[in-house]
Image (cartoon, helix red, strand yellow):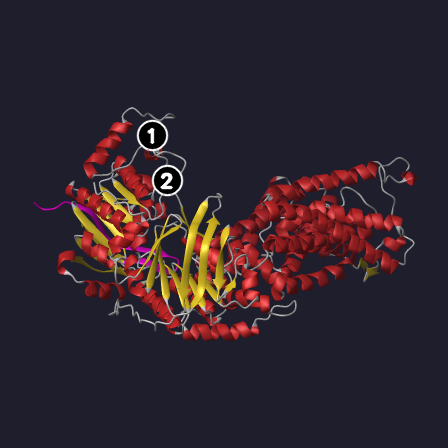
Amino acid sequence: MEPVKAIEMRGITKTFGAIHANQDVDLTVYNGEIHALLGENGAGKSTLMNMLSGIYRQDNGSIVIYGKEVHFTSPKDSIAIGIGMIHQHFKLVDVMTAKENIILGKGKGLFTKNKNLAKEIKEISDRYGLDVNPEKKVYNMSVGEKQTLEIIKVLYRGAKILILDEPTAVLTPQEIKRLFQILRNMREQGCAVVIITHKLNEVMEISDRITVLRKGKTIGTVKTSEVQVPALIEMMVGKKVDLEIKKEKMPIPKKPLLEVDNLYVLNHDHKLALEEISFSLYEGEILGIAGVAGSGQKEICETIAGLTRAERGRIFFEGENIIGKSPRDIIRLGIRMGFIPEDRLGMGLVGSMDIVHNLVLKDYQNQPGVFLKRGPCEVKAKAIVNRLDIQTPGIHFPVKKLSGGNIQKVLLGREIDSNPKVLITAYPVRGLDIGASYKIYDLLNEQKSKGVGVLFIGEDLDVLMDLCDRIMVFCIGKIAGIVNPDEVTKEEIGLMMTGGKEVSLS
Amino acid sequence: MNGIHISKREDLPKKRETVIRILAVILSIVCAGLVIWILGYNPIRVFPSMISGALGTEIRLQQTILKAIPLIVTSLGILVAFKMKFWNIGGEGQIIMGALAASYVALNMDGLPKGILLSLMALAAMIAGGLWAFIPAFFKAKMGVNETIFTLMLNYIAIKYVTYLQYGPWKSPESQGFPKVATFSDNAVLPKLFGIHIGWLIALLLVVIVYIFINHTKKGFEISVVGESRETARYAGMNIATIILIAMFISGGLCGLTGMIQASAVEKTLSANLSGGYGFTAIITAWLARLNAIAVLFVCIAFAILLQGGAYIQISMQIPAAVADMMQGIILFFVLGSEFFLQYKVNLAGSFRKAKEVA
C-alpha cells in the first residue's frame, strides 16, 4: 500500500527583509512516519514549521496537506486541518488545571461543558499512552508533564499531524524515553510526526527519515537506517567537523579556588532554592552542574557572583569569604571571577550597545574621575574580535544584531580578558550552532589548561560527560551527588536529577 | 479576507528613511490643508501665514524663541529620565514646584544683589523640581511603585497647591482683589541679551551639558545601561536605586529650572498656569528627538514654530484656536506615525496573492 502523503511542501521561500530564511525548500512527510527536521540554528527549521502551523505565510511555494493545497492565514486554519504544533516554550496557563488548559480557546459557548471532556481526555490518553491528571494545576507539573499536556491539547483539537520544536531540550533522559514512546505510539496510530532538533543521537534513535536544512535550503532527505552520524553532520554544517571534545587530566595536587560551604538561598517566593550546598572548585578543572531546569542552577551562579543574597552559608574565594559581597565589591576588590550568565543579552550584555561599550561595562567602575574613557576598551575590543574570530561589521556595531555564537564570543571574550581564576558559565552553548559550540568548548578547555577553575552549567548530558572532570548533580536545590563522568552512565545521572525515582514507562 | 501582514524591518537604508520622513511631513501638510479647506479657509494662504507668523518679523521670531526656551529645557529634563526608561510624566508639576521655590526666593529676598538673587532662585528651583521628582523615584527605587501614575498625580498636587497660594496666603494686597501673586521686583527678572531674556543662552548651554553628561560621563553611561536592562546593570555592579534617584533628581531639577525661567522672565510672578503644558509637550519633543540632546534643540525650535504660527493665524486670519490645535495634531500624527513605517513593513500580501492567482 502506498503511504499517504500527510505534508507536502514544495519550493517554499520566505524572506525577512534581506534574510532568506527559507529558499526553495521541499519537505514531504508521510502518515505513520516520524520525520526529523535537522539543521543548525538559523537553518530555517522553525520558519518552515511556523509556515506549516499558519504563523507565517510563505512568499512562494505551495503547501499540500493530505493531497489538498492549503493557504493558511492564521494558526486557526492550520489547527482546523489537523496540524498541531508543540512549541519549545509551552503555551499553558499556569494557574489552571490540565483540563481547563485543554478546553481553553476551544469551546464556542460562554460556559465550559465538562460532561464529555473527561471521557474524551481519557480516550486520547489511552490511545497514545499519555498520562496526565486532568485536575492537576499546571504550576504543580514537571516539565515532562507540561509537555504531555501540550500534546494532549493538540490531539484533543483533532491533530493528525504533530510538529514538535526541540521537544527534548529541557527533559531528563527518562522523560525523553517516555516522550519517544508516545511518539512511537502516535506513529502506530498513523499520525505524521515532525520533530525539530539538532541532537543527532536522538534523531538516529527516533526518526524514520531525516530532512536536513542548511542556510535556508534543503540539503536532502535521507532514510535514518541508511545514514551515519558523520554524514549527517557534514550535511548540516557543510564541512567535516571534528566532534571530539578534548579532556585533559590535570595533575593531582590541586588547590581549591572556590569553596562553597553549607549554602542556603531563597528564591523570589521566599522558598528555599538552594539547600545545604557544599562543594569545592579546584584549579584547572571543569566542574559540571547537571539538573532538571530550575533545580537551583541559576541561583548558585548568581549567589557566587554576588547577585543574589544567601540566607546562610559561606563562599570562599582563595580562602577569603566573599559572601555578602556585591558585584561592585567583587569588581572593585579585584576578585578575579568571570561570569557568563544564562541570559546573555538580558544580563551579560547591553544588546543595543556596541562591543566597546559592552567592554566598558565591566571596566568603568575602576576608572578614575567622572568621564567615561573608551580608548582602552576600543583597543581591547579589536583584540577580542581578532582573537576569538568574531564575525561583526565592526567594533561599533550593536551586539544584539550579531548571531548567537558571536554574541556569546563577545561575552566570553570580555570575561576571559580579565584573566579570571574562576569562570562561571551558565548554559554557554544554548542556542549556538555546532561550530560555535565547539569553539566555546575549546575556549573553556583553554582556560582550564591555564589553571582556571570552570563551573559549567549544562543541559546536554552527553556534552557534560565529555567535557567535565566532575559532574555535580542538582535535584530540587540540593546536591544529589558529585560524580566522575567516566564511572557513571547518562541514565544514572538522569535518575539522580529526578531524585532517584524511576519514571514509569507506561 | 486575507488582510494585511506587518513585519519588522531590518536595516532600512538611510535614503529610504529620509524619504519616508519627508513624505510624512508632506502628507501631514496636505491633510491639514484639506481640513482647512473644508472649514472654508484657503490653505495656500494659511501655511505661508503660519511661517511668516513664526519667523516673519523680529518680534515674531522672538516670540517663537520664547516658546522654544522652556520646551528645550524641559525636554532635556524629560530626556534624562526617559533614557533610563523612567516615564516621567510629571514635568508640569516639577516646573510648577521650581517656579514656586524661585518665587519664594524672589519675593522674600529681593534685597540681594541681582546676580546672587537670580542664582539663588535658579538653585532653589532646581532643588524643588528635583525633590518633586525624587519622591516618585524613591518609591520606584525602593518599592517598585509605578512611576507613570505617580508623577502624573504629583502634577495636580503641585498645580492645586500653587492655586491655593495664589488665592490665599500669597495673594498680593495690591492686586485689588484679583487672585494674583505679587509681581517680582526688577532684581528678580532675568536680564536680556539680544532682545530676548538670557534663558536662550541657558538652554543652549544645557543642550551641550546634557549631551556630554549622557554620552561621555560614567553616570550617563550607567543611566543608559539601567534603561536598557536592569539585570545587566545589576550584573555590572551598578547601584540601581542610587542611579534612579540621581537621574530623577537631575530630570526634575531641569524641569524646575524651566519653572524659574518662566516665572522670572516671562510671567514675572508665580501663577498656577505658568507651566503652559510644556511638561507634556516636552514628552513628544524628547521622543521625536530620539532622546538625543542635540536633536532636542532642533525639534523644539520646529515645535515652537508650529506653536507660534498656530497662535498667529488665530489673530491674523480669524481661524479658531481649535483649528490651529487640530493642525498641530495632524502634523504630529503623521510625523509620529511615520516612526511606525520606519520600523515595520506593511504587506498587502493577501490582496497581492489574489491578484496573482487571477492573472
* Magenta region includes residue B67: no
Q: Is residue A16 magenta?
A: yes
Residue A427 location (% of width, % of height)? 38, 58
For discs 2 and 1, the disc positioned in front in the rendered view: 2
Bounds of the magenta segment = A1-23
Q: Is residue B33 above or below residue A258?
A: above
Q: Chain of mark 1?
A: A
Assign the N terminus of chain A to one quadrant of the image: top left
Task: Pick the residue in front: B269 or B247.
Answer: B247
**Residue B114 sits in quarter:** bottom right
Residue B335 position in % (x across, y down) = 57, 51
| Residue A92 badge | 2
Amino acid carrying label 2: it is: Leu
Residue B74 place in picture, x, y as percent:
69, 53
Q: Is residue A54 visible?
A: no
| Label drawn at residue A107 | 1
Relative depth, front residue between A121 and B71: A121
* Magenta-colored segment: predominant secondary structure: strand
Residue located farthest toward the front when viewing the structure as drawn: A253
